[in-house]
Image (cartoon, rainbow, N blue to C red):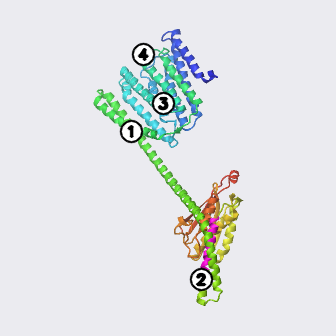
Amino acid sequence: MALRRHWWAISGAVLISAYAVLPFIFAKNSFPLTAAGDITCLLVMAASATAAVANAVGQRGQNRAFWMLLATGCMLWTVNQGLWTLYEVVLRREIPHPFAGDVILFMHVVPLMAAVALRPHYSQAQEKLYLSTLSLLMLLIWWVFLYAFVVFPDEYILLNQELSRQSYDWLYQIENLALLGILAAFVLRTRGPWRKIYIYLLTAYAVYTASSVMIDEAIARNVYYTGSLYDIPLLGSAWLLVGTCEQGRKLTLAAGPAPVSNSQWRFLPSRLAMLAMLSAPVMGIWAVFADPVPLRRHCRLVATFAAMLTLSIFLFLRQFLLDRELLRLLEESRHSLENLRSVQGQLVQREKLASLGQLVGGVAHEINNPVAAILGYSELLTSSGLSPDQSAMASKIAQQARRTRDLVSHLLNFAQQTPAEKTLLDVGALLQRAIAVEGLRMGSQKIALSINVSPGLPQIRGNANQLLQCFMQIAANARDAMLEVGGGTFFVSARQEGNEVVLQFLDNGPGVSEPERVFDPFYTTKPVGHGAGLGLSATYGVVQDHGGNITCENRPEGGAVVTVRFPVSESVAESNPPKAGIAAAAQ
């Protein structure tokens, strides 16, 4: 079991040990030693790229992007080694100068930097793929510019092999040290499985950087040859990348939330882009005043101009995308704020109803007894032979007492609302029944009635008596409103929207002066003696008790619309997929 768990470490030890024996078996600069050295390194580098691709296939999101970028860097490294193998093994020629593989080797570090800059150990759901891609492209362009500015003129224009080699070596080591610095920072700041991955990467590239320095020194002293002991650290660093991918395959690499102290890391790509933009003209100015060779100076100025133009385009594109993303976030924030206000209003309404219910429940009984006594004594006075004026006054007292008794009765009904037993019911049939009852009253009052119930409405869970009273209450309020303007049209519809059944009650009356207050207890626009203002409050409570929502709005063309939404019963929703909503015919 232990051998299987550490197969890569044991295999690496055997491979490196066997490779270390090669210089003692084959002669220096011999073809067998060169072929064995090139092919072994090529296979190990290809194995690291293959292992990274395999990890990317089994991952998602940031983890997949991390492994794909790591695989890209390993692939570029493999291509460089493949070119070495092509010249030294297949063509049996020395590596030419300039060598195209040097550019590929220089660029292979850039995807690795981008992979670590993704910060896959932190959850970044808000980060868009196109922004990450732009950051990678800008980073790539900047390093290409550095290569074109520092190395290219001497390597391809002036053909100064010694100077171009020195420039390449120190620039390449700066690039490797930059990657090591980023990895070291993440090793210190990260915890959990990702820290282990960063440690493996840091170790691999520390070994590789040291190997690169030693090989450069050996080449400068003309003592390096393929398959020598100098290649052992190079081979070891490539095998450590295979081990990194193996650890990534075994570990559960979950991303955690980024702490507030690390929020400044989100601005790192834009700050690096700004640094690149500022560094380009500075380097161009240095070339104008400090480079003594005209041809090289001209080449560097062209590279500076091209880099500034390209980076400017990407910066403007990035800013455009960020602005568009900002507008989207602002729109989402506006919707969230509106939803929050709606929920807050519903919560306040519920608190009002709950507080009023508790108050009314205690007070109504106390009021009812003296009102009954007043009513009884006033009726007794009326029948006791009083004068006409006195009898009229006693009748008025009885009339007001009856009105008070009715109000107390409404208050008790409102306060004693309790969750009733709920069953599956056909809300469309219940709505038609309620409108049929109210239609008898509207027919003689110049009010045209129209109802549209979509066929096949799903059932909801509710209490038929309570909902019937609610629908009749809404219809009665609409009828009273239209009577104020001498009649009108009352339209009722029922349809399904997603997992909700939506009912709408529309009228073309005068509208509501304060639609946001219609569900407040005791709020009414009717004359004194024609309503207590508790009907819609009670309706609001019933709808909320059924898990629904009720709103009132004024229509642009005049009148008001009351919208009631009920959730479809879970058992019904599971057996029947949501249907597309049908637009109300009145809108």
Q: Are marks 4 and 3 in contact (CB under 8 Å)?
A: no
Q: Disc 3 marks which residue?
A: 187
Pick whichever, 288 or 40, lies toward us: 40
Helix, strand or loop at label 3? It is helix
Q: Residues within 10 Å of mark 2 (few under 14, many from 20)?
A: few
Q: Amino acid at mark 2?
A: Lys
Q: Amino acid at mark 4?
A: Ala
Pick whichever, 346 or 244, lies toward us: 346
- Which of the two discs, 2 and 4, labels the residue nearer the N terminus? 4
Cα distance between the residues tagged 1 and 4: 38 Å
Q: Which residues are magenta?
A: 399-416
Dividing the picture into quadrants, the one containing residue 245 is top right
Pick whichever, 276 or 246, lies toward us: 246
Tell me the quadrant of the picture where the C terminus can be found: bottom right
In the image, what residue occupies the spot 50% across and 9% down? Answer: 27
Q: Name the mark on residue 274.
A: 1
- Which of the two discs, 1 and 4, labels the residue nearer the N terminus? 4
Q: Main secondary structure of the magenta part?
A: helix
In the image, what residue occupies the spot 44% across and 15% down? Answer: 224
Find residue 436 and report its horizontal and vertical position in percent: 69, 70
In front: label 3 or label 1: 3
Cα distance between the residues tagged 4 and 3: 32 Å
Cα distance between the residues tagged 2 and 4: 118 Å
Does residue 385 lie above or below 531 as drawn? Answer: below
Q: Are marks 1 and 4 in contact (CB under 8 Å)?
A: no
In the image, what residue occupies the spot 47% across and 51% down? Answer: 330
Could you tell whether 479 is left or right of 123 in the image?
right
Helix, strand or loop at label 2? It is helix
Q: Amino acid at mark 3?
A: Val
Q: Disc 2 marks which residue?
A: 396
Cα distance between the residues tagged 3 and 1: 26 Å
